[in-house]
Amino acid sequence: MIIPSPTLFRYLARDFAMNCLALIGILLGVIYIFDIVELLRRAAKVDAVPFESLLALAALKLPEAGQAMLPFAVMFAAIHTCWRLTKTHEIVVMRAAGLSAWQFLAPLLTVGMAFGLLATAAINPISAVMLDRYDQREAEVLQTDASRFTIARTGIWLRQPLAAESQGKSGYALVRAESFDEAEWRLTNVTVFSFDSDDQFIERLESRVAYLRDGYWEFRDAHQHRPDGASRFAVKHLATNLTASKIEETFSAPETVSFWHIPEYIGIMEETGFPTVRLQIHFQKLLAAPLLFAALILLAATFSLRPPRFGGTGLLIGLGVLAGFFIFFLESMLQAFGLSQKIPVFMAAWTPALLALLLGVTALLHTEDG
């Protein structure tokens, strides 16, 4: 078997990488414009929001969008690269030199897997940090009363707006609990620190157990401590804008957790009683990203390496695009099955990549040796 020269390897790898970067740049530009338009619409309801702040706010979501768009960019760039090599007859020259499809696709596969590793190990942590920063800046710039949730070794921490009628003034409350029971929406060993809008301490509330009701927290056997004295209540209510669905959505958003911290975060969530299936599927999908990108390149090559003289190239490329979208649809469907625990986590995350890889390898084997 003839080994491609380093010069040819670099040429093909550089061509494919530049096509990927150009495509992801175009997609990010389109997404950025749409995000700015949406932020302008929302900012119209708020007084005196600087346009520069909206530009910066939209930029904070770009890493997340880039990570989501990268599989599409890899596949479409592979289709374009293979189609261009075929159109300019460079494939014919490489085949005449004794190279098989596996050999001249090796640079593309190498670059694709490198993009997958980069997305998992670098882009994802950056995206998680910037997405968390986006949530903070969104509340500040658009003046929304966003509640925030954090799970740490010290317990569960919630930050929520403090209703004016609950304490006589506006502000916010920090709720800390040791564990959470999703079945009854119950927090155990709860401490609530209340502050006014000037960050001045109002009171501390301690309770053995708290239940989330419709529009309020219900504390049982609560001890209230204020600067002017202490009180005890059999039942104490604290108004809240939180709902069960809001808490589920917040804690089930794996995009805000860095890839390197996911295993530790899963352990903490299990200790505190929160479901971790969504986070486990997300972690396995990140691990499978390099394999998925390589599989998408093989699929793209299968549908775009047909010599022009045989005709039907456009139809094959269209079928390749449809095959790629089918893989993405299958990925979403299997993720839904995984979240409902109808199939194992590993199967939900790895099946699309393995299926695409098998299809690509089979088609190329048939083309080369069939």
Image (cartoon, rainbow, N blue to C red):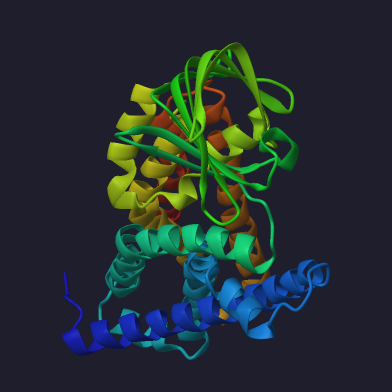
Vertical placement of 52 versus 271: above or below?
A: below
Q: In which quarter of the image is residue 65?
A: bottom right
- In the image, taking residue 104 as reference, residue 133 lies left or right, namely right
Q: What is the x, y in percent for residue 139?
A: 62, 60
Quadrant showing the C terminus: bottom left
Q: What is the x, y in percent for residue 222?
A: 52, 16
Q: What is the x, y in percent for residue 331?
A: 54, 43
Determine if residue 252 is in view. Answer: no
- Quick one: 71 or 134, which is closer to the camera? 134
Q: How many labels does the image show?
A: 0
Query: Going 63% across and 50% down the picture, which residue do you hit?
Result: 146
Query: Going 53% across and 81% down the picture, which residue do you hit?
Result: 25
Residue at the limit of the structure toward the front, as seen here: 228
- Quick one: 232 or 324, which is closer to the camera? 232
- Quick one: 281 or 212, which is closer to the camera? 212
Vertical placement of 334 versus 232: above or below?
A: below
Query: Going 40% across and 88% down the picture, which residue do you hit?
Result: 90
Q: What is the x, y in percent for residue 126?
A: 38, 64
Q: Quadrant of residue 15?
A: bottom left
- Quick one: 129 or 23, which is closer to the camera? 129
Query: Going 40% across and 80% down the picture, which residue do you hit?
Result: 16
